[in-house]
Amino acid sequence: MLGFNKKSNKEKANKIFEKNTEYHTYDIAKCSLIHDGFTNISYRYELEDGNEYQIRIGNDQKFINRKNEKLFLDSIGNKDYVSLNVKNGDAVKKWIVGNNPDAKTARKISFLNKLNKAIEQLHKNKINKEILNQNFVEFLEKSSLEQNIKDKYLSLLNTFNNDKLVMSHNDINPSNMLIIQDKEIYFIDYEWARINYYWWDITNYIREVKLPMWKIYIFCLLNKISFKQMKQHLFVCTCYAYQWTFYMQQTNKIVAYQKEVKKMMEYYFKKLH
């Protein structure tokens, strides 16, 4: 994804590892590729002495602000990173033992309720005003939204102006959390963290796991959330995700994701009426 071949990616990861730790490559017992995404490539390093690290190769996409990422991590007291290069996103992180929720677990109402409580705890962190605010129109210009969808998107944003702002992870999905010892939910990967509306994190998660509407309704009932507002939030969240795809390099993977998000956006748009 970042323009390197597998060999050069691994070589770069090794350099990041040696530069930012007391170890050398001969200390590595096993190296595994764990993530090859839109904004970084990450490896898991298992060492001969039993220690483990995550090595992240960042990139230079202009809308990933690494200084903001570090500021957010510092503000919430996160101590997982051994090093984080704010210029390019390269990082060394202590390995956290846990598992991503599987597809079945991720869509259970009981898990959603637990996740919602974990999100509320994250949001209790005091707002650091130096952290970037979510910009809902940063990708609007280049996106090809139909006028009726664009108008609805902007109209709904105006109605949210007085909603509570919080320290938001901003990209909560099953791959950005760990279940530790089968109970604690632990959030990871704060690349997109922003000051945002309180409802964004849970809404984005629901969008990511494609929760069926009947489960969304039950979740809203159990958590005393307005079902009408949830549908509005889902539309806005998905519309923003669709706009974002136009700023990415138009690889086959992005184009496929763009089509998928557009379909969901149009579905949520219809549910508003």
Image (cartoon, rainbow, N blue to C red):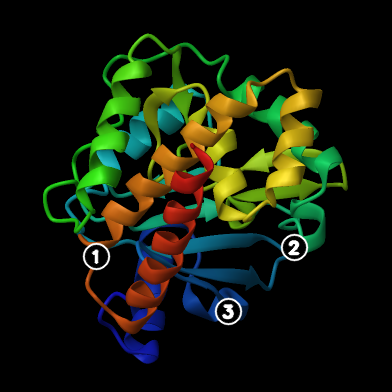
Mark 1 to mark 2: distance in Å? Answer: 26 Å
Residue 102 location, x and y as percent?
77, 62
Label 1 neighbour load within 10 Å: few <14, some 14-19, many 20+: few
Q: Give the amino acid type for the residue marked by disc 3 in the picture.
A: Cys
149 relative position to 178: left or right: left
Q: Give the amino acid type for the residue marked by disc 1 in the picture.
A: Met
Task: Name the residue carrying label 2.
Answer: 103
Label 2 neighbour load within 10 Å: few <14, some 14-19, many 20+: few
Camera-side residue of 74 and 190: 190
Whether residue 166 is situated above or below residue 214 in the rendered picture? above
50 relative position to 188: left or right: right
For mark 3, give the secondary structure.
strand
Camera-side residue of 141 and 42: 141
Camera-side residue of 141 and 24: 141
Task: Name the residue carrying label 1.
Answer: 248
Residue 204 location, x and y as percent?
52, 42
Task: Name the residue carrying label 3.
Answer: 31
**Residue at (35, 17) in percent of width and height:** 159
